[in-house]
Image (cartoon, rainbow, N blue to C red):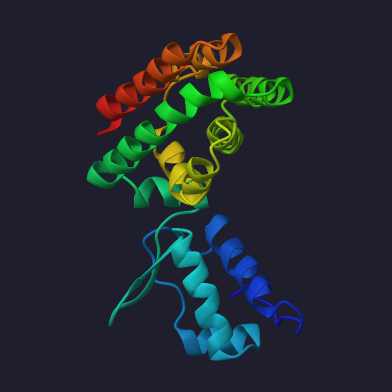
Amino acid sequence: MPLATTRRAGLVDQVIEQMRGAITTGEWPVGQRIPPEPELVTALGVGRNTVREAVRALSHAGLLEVRQGDGTFVRATSEISGAVRRMCGTELKEVLQVRRTLEMEGARLAAKHRTDAELARLTELLRKRDAAMEAEQWAEVIEHDTAFHVLLVQCSHNTLLAELYQGLTEAVKASVAASVDTSQPGRDQVSHTGLLHAVRDGDQEKAAIEAGGFFEELIEKFC
């Protein structure tokens, strides 16, 4: 077992990284039960609580799945694929519906209240997202797409709306990951250009329509 005894500082983070490495390299394949807790404690040279915290963190990230009475199993090889596995069907549909409601109003207000600096940041995020799509660099697509949507709502300058959406960031990122079709080339993904242009032009109604439109497309396609 290729796990090394950890240093005292940052034990949980070190254990998480070692266990993630065993998963991503295939040492622990998807679907396989990982070594039992006592074996991990011995191999890593840490206490049971440290191992449990690491397992809990990786389970929350979607890489591991704890099955009571049966052990802990590898569920996915990355946080992205873990998000896809966690969020599908009814759950994904509900998140997209909530996002549609918040982002339609966020986009409408952003078209009225955004600053030039915010527009420049939105434009740059969308450029990076689209470039990553063309290169099929899906992890970067998810990061930039999530940041674009969070910033869009912040551009509304409605503090409560922005805080509500910020609180959903993890669910937003998971839904982005679940709705990026990695089997399709970048040019076939849902475009945000019309939305950006509406915000740029101060067209509030078009911005809301554009925001709602691509969510309808995602819901129809993935749910």
Q: Is residue 171 above or below residue 55?
A: above
Residue shown at 55% from the left, 25% from the top: 110
Q: Is residue 144 above or below residue 75?
A: above
Locate residue 119: give its quadrant.
top right
Q: Position of residue 48 (x, y in %)?
A: 53, 89
Locate residue 147: give its quadrant.
top right
Residue shown at 66% from the left, 25% from the top: 128
Q: Position of residue 177 (x, y in %)?
A: 46, 39
Q: Nearer the viewer, residue 74 or 177?
A: 177
Residue 182 seen in the figure? no
Q: How many marks?
A: 0
Q: Position of residue 59 (x, y in %)?
A: 44, 66
Q: Position of residue 7 (x, y in %)?
A: 76, 82
Q: Nearer the viewer, residue 67 or 204?
A: 204
Q: Nearer the viewer, residue 100 or 67?
A: 100
Residue 165 seen in the figure? yes
Residue shown at 38% from the left, 16% from the top: 209
Image quadrant for the N terminus? Answer: bottom right
Image quadrant for the C terminus? Answer: top left
Q: Nearer the viewer, residue 176 or 34?
A: 176
Q: Is residue 58 above or below residue 160?
A: below
